[in-house]
Every structure is written in structure tokens, then in C-alpha cells.
Amino acid sequence: MKHAPRLPDPLDPAPLREGELDDGRVGDRRLEEVQLGGAELHGVDFTRVHLVGGDLSGVQWDNGGMQDALVERTNLANVRAVASSLLRVRLRGCRLTGLQWVEGLWRDVEVTDCRADLVALRRTQLERVTFRDCVLTEADLLEARLREVTLERCTLAGADLRGTRFERCELRGCDLDGLQGVDRLHGITMPWADIVQSAGTFAAALGVRVAEDA
């Protein structure tokens, strides 16, 4: 993450006002325990906000997103976002299970200690993004483009990389068991110990069979 969220200090708490989402912008405040589960957000941007807790699960979100935001312990499970962006955003301890972010953009994003199994980032562009200590089991990165992305100590078991493009990306201490589209890792940087640990996954992708001991 090259550029951190640009947040005012202090950031005063204030609730959402009635009809505010219709204006297309929510910003410059701390939002605690916001309840928007299942809402439809059309062209809505959260800008310069600190979200703490709350429920955004199942939100249908298009042509919007977040900019300069810190999001902590918020439920974002099964969010479906289309043509939306995360710009200078930090996600910490959030639930992202089943989140679908399609044909969007993540730039300068840090995702830490999040459960993100079954997340789908199809045809989304990720630039200067870090995933750290996250569960990304069976993540779907079909035709996503990753540039300067780092994954540290993440579980990627069963993830789908078919059609994914990597540029200047790193994997460190990740579980790659059952990874689909292993050939798309061309050019990835990994520590030697991680390469050795993932040798079985790489061999299976190449069709190499392990000889039985005599």
C-alpha cells in the first residue's frame, strides 16, 4: 500500500442522516454500527470515513465505492459490487465471505486479518494491494489484473487464477493447495522455502507424478 487513507484528525462520530444515501456521498465522519444489510446503493461513495462494526452484508452496489476509508470489524459478506472502486482503503478484521467485486478497481488497499473465502474479484484491477493474514479459500480471480500486489500468510487453497494477470507481485507464506490456474503465477516472486513447500502443487499442475520409493 503506497498511499494511506487521507483521513481528517479528529474524525467525529455522526450517524447517517435520513435520505443521505440518495445524495450519492457519505463522508467526513466516524460511522459506528451502521446497519445497511441488503441495501441497494447506486452511485454511492463513502469518502473520508472510519467504519467501525456494522452490517453491509448483501448490499447491491454499483458505480460507487470507498475512498480514503478505514473499515474495521464490518460485515461485508455477500456484497455484490459492479464497476465500483476502493481507493486508499484499509480493511481490518472484516468478514468478506462471498463478496463479489466485478469489473472494478482496488488501488492502495490493505486487507488484514479478514475472512474472505469465496470472494470473487472477476475482471477487477488491483494495484498496490496487500492481503495479510487473510482466508482466501476458493477465491475467484478469473481474469483479474494484479499489479504490485502482495499476499502474506494467506490461505489460497482452491483459489481460481484462470486468466489472472500478475505484474510485480509477491506471495509469502501462503497456502496454495489445490490452486487452479497455477500457470498464471509466471513472474511471481516467492521465498525459496515457499517454493519448496508448494512443490506438490506445482508438480501436479505440470502433470509430474511422484515415484514410489523402491
Image (spheres, helix red, strand yellow):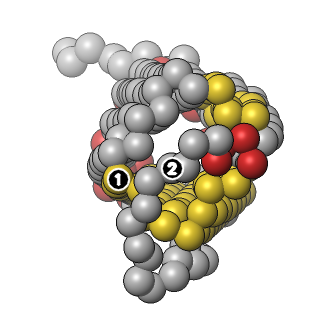
Dot 2 corresponds to which residue? 16
Residue 144 — which label? none
Instruction: Please state the horizontal and vertical placement of residue 97, each as a whole percent of the image.
Output: 41, 27
Q: Residue furthest bottom?
A: 9
Query: Where's the N terminus, which quadrant?
Result: bottom right
Dot 1 corresponds to which residue? 32
SS for callout 2: loop
Does 170 sit above or below residue 138?
below
Does 86 sit above or below residue 68?
above
Q: How far is the residue under mark 1 from the one under mark 2? A: 10 Å
Query: Where's the C terminus, which quadrant?
Result: top left
- In this view, the residue in front, 134 or 99, is 99
Q: Is residue 103 left or right of residue 100?
A: right
Q: Label 1 is placed on what type of residue?
A: Glu
Q: Is residue 110 left or right of residue 166?
A: left
The number of callouts visible is 2
Going from N to C along the chain, the mark reached first, 1 or 2, is 2
Question: Alpha-carbon neighbours of circle 2 within 10 Å: few (<14), some, or many (≥20)?
Answer: some
Q: Can residue 139 be seen in the rendering of this structure?
A: no
